[in-house]
Amino acid sequence: MSNAIKSKKVVFFFPAFSSQEATAPLGILAVATPLLRAGYQVRIIDSTITPNFQKAVLEELRDALCLAVSLVTGPMIRETAQIARAAKALYPDLPVVLGGWHPSLLPDQTLAAECVDVVVSGQGEFAFLEVVQRLEDRASLAGIDGVGYKQDGRLVFNKPRELQPISELPPKAYHLADFNAYERTCGRRWSMYISSLACPYDCGYCTNKGVYGRKWNAIEPGQFVEETTDLATRYRLQLLWVVDDNFLVDRERALGIAEGLVRKEAKFDWSIQASTNLVDRFTVEELKLSNAPG
Ligand code: B12
């Protein structure tokens, strides 16, 4: 049985998200760093780039500490359920942990599923490290903020976790990403990058407030320019998609980033998303800055 020997291996599964695009899941790269720093081994199986992914996951789980899945609400639930059920059938004692936006927004519904043992709501970097350490020690998950678990068949939810500002978070483990495989799959070599968390607004179509509570915070332009140019060069990326929910919240910061990239003669494309009320605060000339030829 899987847990007879003490394992240090954490297996992540990233289900397909029904898109033509393919790149490494940033949420998993984020929670991987504290694990690696604490001496755990990390395997990522992304269904989009892995033929026969179920077999691959089940093989990796043979000597693993737990299975961890990242998902948003929607089609990703299908493969999550498929893999979690297959894992439970083969290794009934192996804990299955779900994190990401879906379990963050609907923790009780997610944890109620028979094949799920633990849910992590909100930021996962340190919550998941604590979960893994407790699983390794076969200790209770009581008291880990942001975590829900099962005890004697009951669903137990610890108190929510305080939001940690992005400037205090460790760097993402980009080196775990197989950019060659993603490029082969979608024809483009690109990555995601994040430079701010939360959003001051509460638009009806967006779920951000439910998880981040309108506490917008961001890194400075200098750090953005350094990190993105380094990533693009190191992994030969054509494009960085800045996945901040609302990149333009701080006008001066946004202009500082655009100017910094122009000054650095950055050779990659970058894209942002922002609410239209904020786009409206920029002149056409200012907006052109972010579209300067590299
Ligand atoms: C990139 C992205 C996509 C990409 C996905 C590409 C990819 N490879 O992941 C694409 C374009 C496909 C996409 C599509 C959609 N998306 Co989208 N997308 C995002 C976006 C902009 C960034 C995600 C990201 O990487 N964030 C950065 C990382 C670092 O944060 P994170 O993923 O949240 O991870 C943290 C925690 O969640 C947690 N965590 C994450 N995974 C795990 C795993 C474990 C085990 C643990 C413990 C913790 C953990 O820890 C991480 C670090 O703190 C988010 C908004 C956002 N700002 O996050 C929306 C968002 C995730 N998308 C959303 C939506 C609604 C959609 C669509 C439904 C849109 C549509 N109408 O078609 C589709 C559905 C996708 C599908 N078909 O399944 C919503 C999700 C709401 C929900 N209920 O789940 C979000 C939150 C936007 C919003 N603000 O409302 N999306």
Image (cartoon, grey):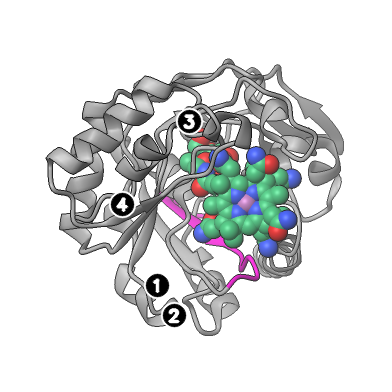
Question: How far apart in space, not on screen, are marks 1 and 4 (Cα)?
Answer: 13 Å
Q: Is mark 4 within 8 Å of ligand 1?
A: no
| Residue 44 placement, left or right of 33 | right
Tell me the mark number nearer the camera, choosing from 1 and 3: 3
* Residue in the picture at 64% in, 25% down: 146
* Residue in the picture at 12% in, 42% down: 264
Locate the C terminus by quadrant. bottom left
Q: Horizontal and vertical percent for residue 114?
A: 83, 53
* Residue on which disc 2 sits: 185
**Amino acid type indicated by mark 3:** Leu
Query: For residue 158: magenta?
Result: no
* Residue on which disc 1 sits: 182
Which comes sooner in the sequence, label 1 or label 3? 1
Task: Name the quadrant containing residue 152.
Answer: top right
Which dot marks residue 248? Answer: 3
Is 30 placed above or below 94 here? above
Which comes sooner in the sequence, label 2 or label 4? 4
Question: How far apart in space, not on screen, are marks 2 and 3 (Cα)?
Answer: 31 Å
Tell me the mark number nearer the camera, choosing from 2 and 3: 3
Callout 2 crowding tier (Cα within 10 Å): few <14, some 14–19, many ≥20: some
* Residue on which disc 4 sits: 174
| Element on which disc 3 rests | loop
